[in-house]
Amino acid sequence: MEYADRIKALPPYLFAELDKRKQQLKQKGLDLIDLSIGDPDLETPQPIVEKMYEELQNPINHHYPDYEGLFEFREAVALWYERRFGVSLDPSREVMALIGSKEGIAHFPLAFVNPGDYVLVPDPGYPVYRASTILAGGIPYFMPLKEERAFLPDLRDIPSEIAKRSKLMFLNYPNNPTGATATRKFFREVVAFAEDYDLIVAHDLAYSELYFDEPPTSFLAVEGAKEIGIEFHSLSKTFRMTGWRIGFAVGNAHLIQGLGKVKTNVDSGVFCAIQRTAIWALQGNVDEEVRKWQMILKKRRDLMANGLKELGFSPFVPQATFYLWLKVPEGYTSVSFADKLLEVGIVVTPGSGFGQNGEGYIRMALTVSEDRLKEALNRLKNLRF
Ligand SMILES: *Cc1c(COP(=O)(O)O)cnc(C)c1O
């Protein structure tokens, strides 16, 4: 039975070999320090779990949810956006619940991209932007994220022929995998570019709360952004709720409505008990937990960034996210260096898995304890490159 062309067009899974070696080493009993996992290592904060117990007991939560999310959920999102970013949203038209932001990102191009349309995709980038473009029949055009530009794409490098045939641009700041953050100035350039070429901008803000000093801005906080923009957000990273599957889309009402048209035909919303728990979290009831989480990540970042510098590496020191993006030593590729680290039981993600421009880098996810990071640095010290 033949796969459909759209499935065949998806890029192959690059890490199959590495995964196999990881499994082999694990079976041999090697103590692996796994820095390849983009999922918080600490559990969901206990108060959130307790709130969920309570909501589970309430039969009002046991039925099909509304497609677009409970009105109270959309209201809580709007209030949180106002409080956190100074962005006003109309909960009835400009907010929609998602089964995790990945779900929304994956479905969005189906609503707006026709076969043959170009979609501007950051490279390196979260693989879903490219995959969802391909599944909609669109053609990804990769915008290189270069270290010398602090991993912001240079919009002037996009040929105007391509820009004219593009429907949509994906962006993601704070960025996975590089850890870069965007400036308002850059977002203003994006709005102007999108106006010039009649583009939709889809911004992924999943890491907005995992910051260490300056809180990152919302794309929608820039003037004109709501005319052309949609922003995807998630409770996964902020509240360590990756397994719960809840996120939301906010922004231009027409864009939200288009996404909603796809979703009403493929899913039936988010479990109401989870939505009501999420409301409670967004109302600020666990802000103290979020602050502690930020402090833990900041300490890990400092420990690892400083340790790597002492060993002669020059990591990009992130202002947000739990990733360290690291240039590999001379003579290595992303994959061969990841392989080398595997010899001493350190698992990282080769940058090339995030796109061609990720070649020459690896990504370390700081989703292990400080003790384990110290152990990783020790092992690195004894490795000869
Ligand atoms: C983790 C992550 C998400 C969040 O996905 P959910 O589906 O909300 O869990 C979205 N975008 C990026 C870039 C991520 O790394």
Image (spheres, rainbow, N blue to C red):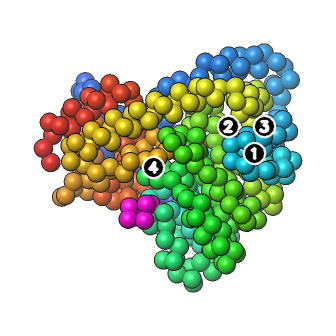
Q: Position of residue 292 (x, y in %)?
A: 53, 27
Determine if residue 177 is in view: no
Mark in front: 4 vs 1 = 1
Mark in front: 3 vs 1 = 1
Q: Which residue is mark 3?
A: 76
Badge 3 amino acid: Ala
Q: Are marks 3 and 1 in contact (CB under 8 Å)?
A: no
Disc marking residue 246: 2
Q: Position of residue 368 (x, y in %)?
A: 39, 30
Badge 2 amino acid: Ile
Q: Position of residue 377 (x, y in %)?
A: 25, 35
Q: Which residue is mark 1?
A: 82
| Left or right of residue 316, residue 242 in this image | right
Q: Are marks 4 and 3 in contact (CB under 8 Å)?
A: no
The residue drawn where x is 47% and y is 46% is 319
Label located before the other in sequence (2 or 1): 1
Give yes or no for residue 150 being in the magenta stretch.
Answer: yes
SS state under label 3: helix
Q: Tell which residue pokes out farthest to the bottom in this image.
A: 161
For this rendering, which residue is in front, 26 or 192? 192
The answer to which quarter of the image holds residue 195 is bottom right
Residue at mark 4 to residue at mark 1: CA–CA distance: 25 Å
SS state under label 4: loop
